Amino acid sequence: MVVVLTGAGISAESGLATFRGPDGLWEGHRPEDVATPEAFLSAPELVQRFYDDRRAALATVEPNAAHRALARLEHALGDAFLLVTQNIDDLHERAGSRRVLHMHGRLKAARCTECGESTHWDGTLVDEPPCPFCSQRALRPDVVWFGEIPYGLSEIDVALRRVRVFVSIGTSGNVYPAAGFASFARAVGARTVELNLEPSLGIDDFVEHQHGPATQVVPAWVDGFLAEREA
Ligand code: BJW
């Protein structure tokens, strides 16, 4: 089983900002201070506008060569492949990936804080539209903030127990539980690979690494891996 974990770095060259660093998405705020249910409760309009803008921006960006390389890898491996993304954008799907698990939710989904139902969402939420299930005006972005439980943890656990090759792409290794996957994969005997612009916080968990822009290192690694498999 090949498990790939992606983070914001894979979408950076498509034009979507990453979270941390000087030009980070939260402009000087620490993500753990602003990406919380408490921040939403204290400034709902600000938070809704922030996600509405990011949702609208999806229409202005395209998947890049790294997203497309992972779709190619899935095509070659079929069921023996799982892509776990921390990203809430839809660029993996638009590149052709199907076995994608969005552990931190999706920009194009809204969840009702009254009835708990989640629904596909393309429009805005700041105007408090009614929930299509219960009609309450209580929709929020269906994303996972600090202190909330990520999606798909049982499916990820099953995949990580069977993983032979674990590849981490474009993530800084700051946020758990995702930041713990490489060490788990290594403990079960997997080959662990990091493809990132720079060494992540978890660099010691990887037996192989290539540092550079995702649009260069990911297609090159996928080509090499598929050639190795066929040899
Ligand atoms: C490029 C590139 C290019 C740039 N090419 N690369 C103490 C210890 C351990 C854990 C905790 C702790 N205290 C609290 C916790 C838990 C907490 C946590 O991790 N806190 C940390 C601050 C320590 N985690 C949680 O609360 C999570 N839930 C949880 O733990 O539930 C409990 C539980 C879990 C499991 C079992 C049982 C119970 C929830 C975390 C939710 C994170 N949410 C966010 C926001 C999502 C919505 C949104 O998008 O707005 O998710 S925060 C933000 O960080 C977002 C991202 O998915 C996530 C990770 O960021 P990512 O992707 O790594 O981005 P960056 O910017 O950090 O890095 C980009 C990388 O790309 C860099 O390395 C660049 O170099 C690189 N790069 N350009 C290649 N062109």
Image (cartoon, rainbow, N blue to C red):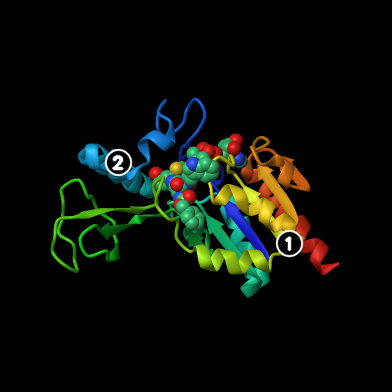
Residue 150 located left or right of residue 199: left
Residue 95: horizontal and vertical position, in percent? Answer: 52, 59
Q: Is residue 61 among the parts visible in the rendering?
A: no
C-alpha distance separating marks 1 and 2: 37 Å
Q: Residues within 10 Å of mark 1 (few under 14, many from 20)?
A: some
Q: Is residue 50 among the parts visible in the rendering?
A: yes
Quarter holding the C terminus is bottom right
Disc 1 is placed on an element classified as loop
Question: Which amino acid, by three-letter code, is at mark 2?
Answer: Glu
Vertical comparison of 158 with 187: above or below: below
Disc 2 is placed on an element classified as helix
Vertical comparison of 170 with 225: above or below: above
Question: Which amino acid, by three-letter code, is at mark 1?
Answer: Val
Q: Residue at x 55, y 58 (%)?
A: 84
Q: Which mark is residue 38?
A: 2
Which residue is denoted by mark 1 in the rendering? 188
Query: Mark 2 and mark 1 in contact (Cβ < 8 Å)?
Result: no
Vertical comparison of 207 with 80: above or below: above
Ligand 1 within 8 Å, label 2 CB: no
Residue 103: horizontal and vertical position, in percent? Answer: 47, 57
- Residue nearer the viewer, 64 or 183: 183
Q: Residue at x 72, y 50 (%)?
A: 193
Quarter location, residue 79: bottom right
